[in-house]
Amino acid sequence: MPDTRKVTASIKENVAYMNQVLPVEESFDIVQREMTVGGREASFYFINGFVNDESMLKIMDSLFGVKAENMPGSVTAFVKECIPYVEVNVIGDFDQVFRNLLSGTACFFVDGYEACIVIDCRSYPARSVDEPDKDKSLRGSRDGFVETIVFNTALMRRRIRDSHLVMQMLEVGESSRTDVAVCYMSDRVDKELLDNVMSRLKSIRTDALRMNQQSLAECLFKRKWFNPFPKFKFTERPDTAAVCLLEGKVVIMVDNSPSAMILPTSVFDIIEEANDYYFPTLTGIYLKITRGLIALMTVFLTPVFLLFMQNLNWLPKVFAFVAVKDTVNIPLIFQLLLLEIAIDGLRLAALNTPNMLSTPLSVIAGLVMGEFSVASGWFNSEVMLYMAFVAVANYTQPNFELGYALKFMRLLLLVLTAMFNWIGFLAGCIIVICSICFNKTLSGRSYLNVKLN
């Protein structure tokens, strides 16, 4: 519940209430600094590690130089005449005081002033804006989003020097009060979509965005669990986000998250990557077509192979060489499913392997598990070949969620084909098509076609 109590002119009452609500004595990082300014009692509250020590030193040095006879009569005049800093605000209720303090600003109380002075000299811990590991470009900029929302919005503002670029800041979460920035071009955005997004954001009632953007995405759109295709596009590249803004889309940034959420989106937007913008039109179209064909192959290659192995009489003589030559000790369907799980296991192992051990362990996994699993009779070489292609081809997709959505569709096709032969394969194809065609975006539009103003 919001704190409706107002700041009073008594420094003692204000300090007593602040110390009652905040664990000043228990928490080492919540600092209270008492001082005398112009012959009056004053008190600073700030979070250790968030304020810029150099700026605070200069501000305090200026405050110590204020004499009693020069003290202004109002808090507004005091801010204008005695605080030599750019970002200063005056607030009168404790709810806003606590929000500002816990977000990193310094709150300053002076006896006799019926308001709190908020000085925004925050200095968040942040890493450098290096190019993201997942979304790289061959000929693009080499910067990327970080976990600090102010840096991320600045990276986009640097690319779009237009007065129509609007960045609205909201707070989501009763406990976390996470900063969420909604970015759009006011002259290009779809007004209906923007109103829909803003109303959904303002109506969110949750305790905290525990997993940042993923939690926000789940609050914005309650998608059906059985449809794995992503509803949003995520990017860690500011140039990609800037291009989407200029196309009339809405970009949502969440503090503590190094990626931007882009909407509305379609399946064609999701398979795009940064290189598509940096190459000539013909090259970009070729890359998109290639990526689309490889995506289709990752879904249908192994199910089609399984279907023909179950119906060898369907196999044309030209492609007779693809048939399994060696003895099949384990049914092909179980070989394919085991390899699907093994590939995910290797991927998880790679994520948790120290960098110094990644190369030797990769050699062990590739040689020992690949060659000797075939030699021992567990797997057939043809199955290993096709699954190796699928494992590598999954990385052609820039979107991680889309890669797993295609994987789930492939598993569904494999199981249905193994159980019901060609009827199961046909039913699986219908399910895949329906999952894409009837998937709706946040705006309620088709997943296959997003129309912008």
Image (cartoon, rainbow, N blue to C red):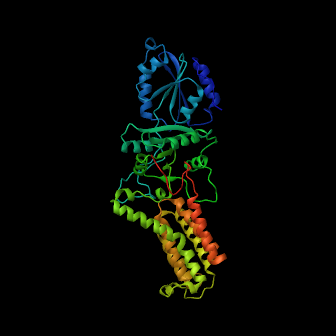
Whole-percent x and y of residue 176? 59, 40
- Counting from the top left corner in percent of width and height, residue 101 is at 54, 32
Q: Nearer the viewer, residue 95 or 434?
A: 434
Q: Is residue 11 left or right of residue 54?
A: right
Q: Does the rendering let one see residue 149?
A: yes
Relative vertical location of residue 20 with respect to residue 111 in this rendering, above or below? below
Residue at image point 35% right, 55% down? 140
Instruction: Residue at 43%, 49% (x, y): give it.
Output: 244
Tally of marks: 0
Residue in the foreground of this view, choosing between 439 and 4? 439
* Rendering coords of residue 67 (x, y %): 43, 15
The quarter of the rendered structure image containing the N terminus is top right
**Observer able to see residue 408:** no
Q: x%, y% of residue 286?
A: 38, 65
Q: Quadrant of residue 77?
A: top left
Front residue (pair 434, 411): 434
